[in-house]
């Protein structure tokens, strides 16, 4: 059972007390790469790096050692719509963790020397990413379908953009966006909720709140596009996809179920059984759905030999067309629901991921649906709804295609 609380400055807290020997906590900040200004490309991710490089009272070494000294782990990530600092540790170290979060998020000083040093690290990360076409193509696909909008830009930014960043621009971005009202402190561990609130009040309660709204430019009408990019890769990499539902739309759970049937993590997905198992054309073929606050992305990805590219595209489209044309039978639908419910239940045992998930849900929706409630919703989905969703999202005339060759 989740418990929630909101501090006077707007900081949200969500917690589940669980009798485990480890605890997990994260500070999720509702700002990401799509919130960068024209001259700030890559800054959200860069801040995720340099936020650990020194505060008003700690050097970088002391920040990194603060959790490591007690066997804990400190980490961070950046997405297009949020940034997160999170840690795993022993329950006795909750106070140590929250004090450190508050120090690095609200009192980092971003030394010039560390900024210049970290630029080289991030540029190495950008170049390393270019050596992973199976990952890079997803960013290039979103750039293709969201041309001209910040949400389409690569989270890491470009080498030239990173080199332009400086301490002043970092401080301005943090001041503008790192506000308690845009944050959620998410926790799963063996600590009473009342004690967690007292600690949060102690270390976050004196941070001034702000009513400044976060304004995002919503992508306008989508136009399907096809692009071929020349890359020196052995395989051909391909994404077929479309824009999809945002966080607020009712059919997002039905689409998640449909995507799982088409090309989810199960080895028995339609794409895997056909393209890999039947024909042996691709080692990896998968479908995915990523919702954002005002849009979403559906993708089918595969990598294959050059001579198999067109056949793989035809087979992917055949499976999507089949889901549009023929409603699932009763037994197929029951199996698909049971599979997804089983996957969600097993995922709920990964407490770090669950901590991040409930924090994100509380940030976006102001609430968290219990697992039983989500499973009940899945059971209510019928074949007719899945077919309507398939016709809306999988229609071939709406598909964009990106190919690396």
Image: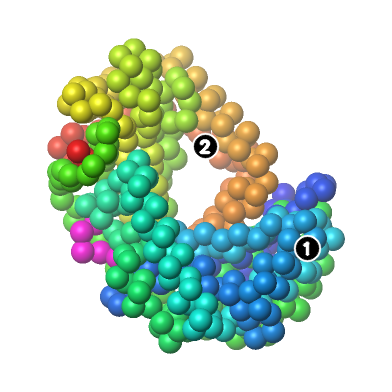
Q: Which quadrant does the C terminus fall into?
A: top left
Q: Residue at x 36, y 19 (%)?
A: 276
Q: Residues within 10 Å of mark 1 (few under 14, many from 20)?
A: few
- Residue 345 marker: none
Q: Could you say whether the residue bearing mark 2 is in a helix, strand or loop?
A: helix
* Res. 3 in view: no
Q: Which is more N-terminal, label 1 or label 2?
A: 1
Residue 215 in percent (x, y) is at 36, 73
Q: Residue at x 33, y 51 (%)?
A: 130
**Disc 1 designates what residue?**
69
Q: Residues within 10 Å of mark 2 (few under 14, many from 20)?
A: few
Asked where in the image residue 338 lies, by quadrant, the reply is: top right
Left or right: where 147 falls relative to 370 = left
**Disc 2 designates what residue?**
377
Span shown in magenta = 146-151
Left or right: where 152 falls relative to 333 = left
Whether 244 is among the magenta residues is no
Q: Residue at x 34, y 12 (%)?
A: 278
Left or right: where 246 falls relative to 228 = right
């Amino acid at each position: 059972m989740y418990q929630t609380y909101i501090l006077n400055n707007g900081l949200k807290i969500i917690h589940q007390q669980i009798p485990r020997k480890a605890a997990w906590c994260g500070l999720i900040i509702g700002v990401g790469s799509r919130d960068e200004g024209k001259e700030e490309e890559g800054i959200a991710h860069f801040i995720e790096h340099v936020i650990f490089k020194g505060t008003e009272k700690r050097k970088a070494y002391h920040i990194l050692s603060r959790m490591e000294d007690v066997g804990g782990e400190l980490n961070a990530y950046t997405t297009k719509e949020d940034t997160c600092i999170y840690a795993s540790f022993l329950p006795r170290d909750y106070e140590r963790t929250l004090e450190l979060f508050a120090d690095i998020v609200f009192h980092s000083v971003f030394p010039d020397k560390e900024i210049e040093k970290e630029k080289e690290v991030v540029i190495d990360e950008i170049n390393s990413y270019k050596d992973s076409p199976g990952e890079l193509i997803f960013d290039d696909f979103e750039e293709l379908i969201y041309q001209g909008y910040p949400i389409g830009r690569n989270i890491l930014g470009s080498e030239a953009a990173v080199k332009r960043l400086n301490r002043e621009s970092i401080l301005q971005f943090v001041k503008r966006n790192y506000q308690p009202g845009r944050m959620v402190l998410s926790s799963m561990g063996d600590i009473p909720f009342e004690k967690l609130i007292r600690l949060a009040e102690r270390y976050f309660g004196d941070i001034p709140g702000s009513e400044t709204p976060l304004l995002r430019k919503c992508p306008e009408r989508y136009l399907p596009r096809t692009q071929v990019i020349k890359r020196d890769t052995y395989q051909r990499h391909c994404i077929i996809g479309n824009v999809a539902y945002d966080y607020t739309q009712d059919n997002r759970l039905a689409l998640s179920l449909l995507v799982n049937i088409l090309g989810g993590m199960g080895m028995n997905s339609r794409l895997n059984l056909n393209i890999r198992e039947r024909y042996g054309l691709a080692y990896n073929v998968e479908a995915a759905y990523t919702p954002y606050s005002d849009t979403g992305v559906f993708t089918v990805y595969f990598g294959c030999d050059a001579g198999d590219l067109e056949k793989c595209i035809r087979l992917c489209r055949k499976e999507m067309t089949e889901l549009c044309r023929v409603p699932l039978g009763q037994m197929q639908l029951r199996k698909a629901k049971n599979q997804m419910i089983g996957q969600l239940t097993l995922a709920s045992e990964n407490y770090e991921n669950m901590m991040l998930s409930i924090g994100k849900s509380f940030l976006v929706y102001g609430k968290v649906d219990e697992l039983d409630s989500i499973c009940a919703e899945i059971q209510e989905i019928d074949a007719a709804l899945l077919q309507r969703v398939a016709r809306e999202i999988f229609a071939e005339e709406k598909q964009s295609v990106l190919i690396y060759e």
